[in-house]
Image (cartoon, helix red, strand yellow):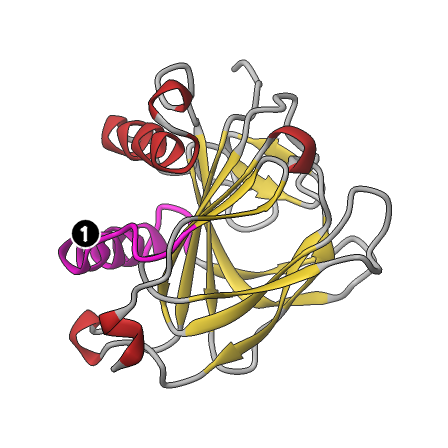
Amino acid sequence: MTAGLFPKERAVVAPGAVHVPGWLPPARQRELVEACRSWARGPVPIRHTRLPRGGVMSVQTVCVGWHWQPYRYSRTADDVNGEPVAEFPDWLVALGREALAGAYGDAGGEPYTPDTALINFYDGDAKMGMHQDKDERSGAPVVSLSIGDTCVFRLGNTENRGRPYTDVELTSGDLFVFGGASRFAYHGVPKVYPGTADPALGLTGRLNITLRETGLQD
């Protein structure tokens, strides 16, 4: 009740890292859930990514525009089924620009041209260890959208996986952007709170959509 009466406000968590609670309205969240379900069916289906040393990520991932496998991008999913990934739609570019403007102000959105999306699905047991997003050749900001269950998002420093870091609770509809001095900060998701999503979403678990500029050419 208190959260509804006094909604959280936009917050600068670190230089270049901005949290905008409730940025996505419920109708837009439901549209994105359906889009993610379509991408999860293929042409390259959602999967648990296998790491080079044999470990398997607890989150499930599907990609749009470019396929990510540790630690590179390609147009075909050579580690899954060899198929070309789904094309990156223009409406997702527009959404990325809207999000950047929502975080940084009107001057932030127009030059931004994301060309890949990594969509991670978390069930109640899934986590994401501390890591850097550094496989892109572009230093443009990463736009992160949360839908479904609430999670703890940990934003660290650019030097190592340890302290100092800041924990931020991300709920459904929240926007988080990290660029500038925080673009290569270590970050992760140590905890998801199962059953916290609005049942009206028709989603069990958490979706995280991250939009990025790869800086790559075909």
Residue at which label 1 appears: 28
Where disc 1 sits, the SS reads: helix
Quarter of the figure with the N terminus: bottom left
- Does residue 36 belong to the magenta stretch? yes
- Please tell me which residue is depicted at 38% across the width and 18% down the height of the picture: 107
Residue 117 x/y as whole percent: 44, 40
Nearer-the-camera pick, 202 or 69 = 202
Residue 96 x/y as whole percent: 36, 33
Q: How many numbered marks have been drawn onto this rendered protein structure?
A: 1
Quadrant hosting residue 26: bottom left
Indicate whether 28 appears above or below 1. above
Residue type beneath disc 1: Arg
Q: Is residue 58 visible?
A: yes
Nearer-the-camera pick, 104 or 207 = 104
Q: Is residue 195 left or right of residue 134?
A: left
- Please tell me which residue is depicted at 34% across the width and 36% down the height of the picture: 102
Quadrant hosting residue 70: top right
Indicate whether 14 appears above or below 97. below
Nearer-the-camera pick, 117 or 184 = 184
Q: Is residue 163 left or right of residue 135?
A: right
Residue 95 x/y as whole percent: 29, 35
Magenta residues span 20-45
Direction bottom: furthest residue:
195
Q: Is residue 170 left or right of residue 198?
A: right
Residue 34 x/y as whole percent: 21, 57
Nearer-the-camera pick, 5 or 207 = 5
